[in-house]
């Protein structure tokens, strides 16, 4: 199948080309993201392959349909950037990679917690300058703390297990469906507001939906324990960033580790080191000593990239042959608030 691959980075190209040896699709790689300005590049391509920040709204989908596109293949798990209702009306199928490597994201999440809590980036900066003083580097043990995991699907379950069984945290969880194996491992399900009020650490692993949008807001922060640590490797808009900044300024929040950010589409995945950044909210976040941010890289392991490429190209091959699409997403997967 002829496929326009948007937002291509060198690593996407490398893993997709390697996996495509088994499929022989005609892959056309484009560096820009898919949006209303770049959609023309997909004209004549039966499929487009996109990532988390491509714009796949009703307008773009309409233009894709006009150009002959019948399939949107997301090379990620989340699909909040796609207007699924519009896709359905236009007869465009949407597929994703529901589970490429939950370990990649869960391990990175634990890494962020440890790096933030034990001040590892600050320590490394000091050592590089031959400053071996330890003042200001006092951390906290994870052991014995109360960790709240919101969303115990593939990634959240691994994080909950690691925190409970690996580090000896008390783990609270909230989800619309409980996982009996986690309960057996000692994880305690509570409702979301109880979790947010009782946890020392809150880590987010649920999808972005109307119900979860800005779940960490002024009200949630006001009810939280003093010194709360917030970790988000899921989707930026789960957190009201302005509220987070207010919480940091008031010292109510003791630490923040983010791999995702609600306005990340204007920043992440690009080298902007010589640019002026207009996003004052993001720049303010960077000024706090107790904030650690990475640019949406939790998925970025050899295993995950290889799995993403293979699953995406398999879905495209299945669509080409008219086979049932195992990784199809449609509007019924979005649970309204
Ligand atoms: P999953 O579908 O396996 O798990 C999501 C869980 O959230 C499910 O158990 C679901 O029941 C639960 N959930 C849904 N609505 C909820 C609600 N309102 N409140 C509480 N829980 C709710 O997904 P996953 O593979 O574990 O991925 C989790 C999220 O991680 C994805 O939605 C995606 O946004 C994000 N992600 C980020 C990266 C990254 O690189 N940072 C990579 C992959 C996925």
Image (cartoon, rainbow, N blue to C red):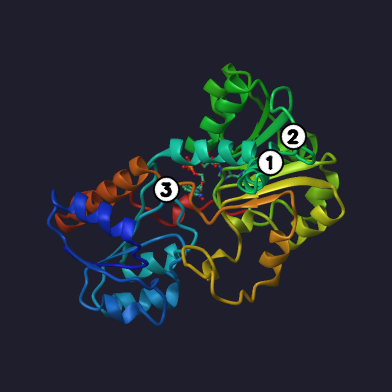
Q: Quadrant of residue 307?
A: top left
Quadrant (top left, top right, bottom left, bottom right) of the N terminus: bottom left
Which residue matches tag 1?
119
Of labels 2 and 1, earlier in sequence is 1
Please tell me whether mark 2 sits on a helix, a strand or a loop: loop
In the orientation shown, which residue stands out farthest toward the front?
Answer: 130
Cα–Cα span, label 3 and label 2: 27 Å
Question: Pointer 1: residues within 10 angstroms few (<14), some, or many (20+)?
Answer: many
Q: Which residue is mark 2?
A: 139
Q: Is residue 51 above or below residue 114?
A: below
Report how far apart the C-alphas of labels 3 and 1 lie in the structure.
22 Å
Q: CA distance from mark 2 to mark 1?
A: 7 Å
Q: Are marks 2 and 1 in contact (CB under 8 Å)?
A: yes
Mark 3 or 1, nearer chain start: 1
The x, y position of residue 166, in whole percent, is 58, 21
Q: Nearer the viewer, mark 3 or mark 1?
A: 1
160 vs 249, nearest the viewer? 249
Residue under pointer 3: 300
Numbered disc 1: secondary structure: loop
User: In front: mark 3 or mark 2?
Assistant: 2
Q: Is residue 125 left or right of residue 20?
A: right
Crowding at dot 3, Cα within 10 Å, few <14 / some 14-19 / many 20+, comes out as: some
Is residue 141 in sight in this rendering?
yes
Q: Percent x, y for residue 97?
A: 36, 48
Describe the element under mark 3 as helix, strand or loop: loop
Q: Specify whether tag 3 is near ligand 1 (CB below 8 Å).
A: yes
């Amino acid at each position: 199948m002829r496929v326009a691959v948007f937002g291509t980075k060198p690593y996407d190209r490398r893993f997709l080309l390697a996996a495509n040896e088994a499929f022989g699709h005609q892959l056309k790689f484009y560096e820009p993201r898919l949006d209303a300005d770049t959609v023309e590049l997909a004209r004549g391509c039966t499929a487009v392959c996109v990532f988390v920040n491509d714009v796949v709204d009703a307008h773009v989908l309409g233009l894709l349909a006009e150009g002959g596109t019948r399939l949107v293949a997301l090379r990620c798990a989340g699909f909040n950037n796609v207007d699924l209702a519009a896709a359905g009306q236009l007869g465009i199928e949407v597929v994703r990679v529901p589970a490429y490597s939950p370990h990649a994201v869960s391990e990175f999440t634990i890494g962020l917690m440890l790096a933030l809590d034990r001040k590892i980036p600050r320590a490394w900066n000091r050592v590089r300058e031959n400053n071996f003083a330890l003042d200001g580097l006092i951390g906290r043990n994870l052991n014995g703390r109360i960790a709240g995991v919101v969303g115990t699907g593939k990634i959240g379950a691994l994080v909950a297990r690691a925190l409970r069984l690996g580090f000896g945290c008390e783990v609270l969880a909230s989800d619309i469906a409980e996982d009996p194996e986690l309960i057996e491992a000692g994880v305690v399900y509570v409702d979301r507001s109880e979790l947010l009020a009782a946890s020392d650490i809150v880590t987010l692993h649920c999808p972005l939906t109307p119900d979860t949008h800005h779940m960490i807001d002024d009200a949630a922060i006001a009810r939280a324990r003093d010194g709360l640590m917030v970790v988000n490797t899921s989707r930026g808009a789960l957190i009201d960033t302005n509220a987070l900044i207010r919480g940091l300024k008031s010292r109510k929040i003791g630490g923040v580790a983010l791999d995702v950010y609600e306005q990340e589409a204007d920043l992440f995945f690009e080298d902007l080191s010589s640019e002026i950044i207009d996003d004052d909210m993001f720049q303010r976040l960077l000024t706090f000593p107790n904030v650690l941010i990475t640019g949406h890289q939790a998925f970025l392991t050899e295993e995950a990239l290889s799995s993403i490429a293979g699953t995406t190209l398999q879905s495209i091959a299945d669509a080409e042959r008219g086979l049932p699409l195992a990784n199809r997403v449609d509007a019924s997967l979005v649970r309204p608030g």
